[in-house]
Image (spheres, rainbow, N blue to C red):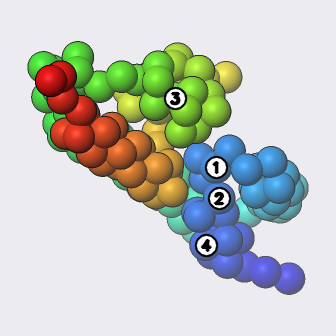
Amino acid sequence: MRTVEDLLKEMKPLMGTNNPAERERLDMLTAELNARQLTDEEKAMAQAWWNGGVDEMEQDIATLRSQIEEEDYKLIPISYIAKKYFGKSASWLYQRINGNKVGGRQYTLNAEQKATFNAALQDIADRIRSFSIA
């Protein structure tokens, strides 16, 4: 039987994922954790882990917001990026950039999504740089 610590370690990389298989795995691990009779020490460990994850997510959101200045934010074609690079709606991307709660859960961009977002910005910048009117 895995320890609570092992379960939490396995759950961490799955938090915030949109991948259906990973979401299912996270749900199974969460159910397994919830089914256990935890000691007070294990409860404290799980609560600290959860609070740390929330703090980490809030830091990610604050970092995202600080990196995108108000004027720059107005320049970014969020709707275009959401549709072309993520296959999602603009509201989906806004929710993740702003750390909105969706269905009771707070979401932000995960590492893979941040890389996609950054690549989208670079692609758009390159396209704008190569464009000129004669």
Q: Is residue 66 left or right of residue 84?
A: left
Residue 99 placement (x, y as % from top left)? 42, 30
Q: Which residue is denoted by mark 2 in the rendering?
A: 14
Say above or below: 133 vs 43. Answer: above
Label 4, residues with CA under 10 Å away: few <14, some 14-19, many ≥20: few
Tell me, yes or no, if residue 96 can be seen here: yes
Which comes sooner in the sequence, label 4 or label 1? 4
Q: Are marks 3 and 4 in contact (CB under 8 Å)?
A: no
Residue 4 placement (x, y as % from top left)? 69, 72
The numbered dot on residue 46 is none
Q: CA distance from mark 2 to mark 1?
A: 6 Å
Which comes sooner in the sequence, label 2 or label 3? 2
- Secondary structure under badge 4? helix
Q: CA distance from mark 4 to mark 2?
A: 10 Å
Q: Are marks 4 and 2 in contact (CB under 8 Å)?
A: no
Residue type at tag 2: Leu
Q: Which residue is denoted by mark 4 in the rendering?
A: 9
| Nearer to us: label 3 or label 4 | 3
| Nearer to us: label 4 or label 2 | 2
Q: Which residue is denoted by mark 1 in the rendering?
A: 17
Q: Which residue is denoted by mark 3 in the rendering?
A: 82
Q: Are marks 2 and 1 in contact (CB under 8 Å)?
A: yes
Label 2, residues with CA under 10 Å away: few <14, some 14-19, many ≥20: some
Q: CA distance from mark 3 to mark 4?
A: 31 Å
Which comes sooner in the sequence, label 1 or label 3? 1
Residue 59 placement (x, y as % from top left)? 30, 46
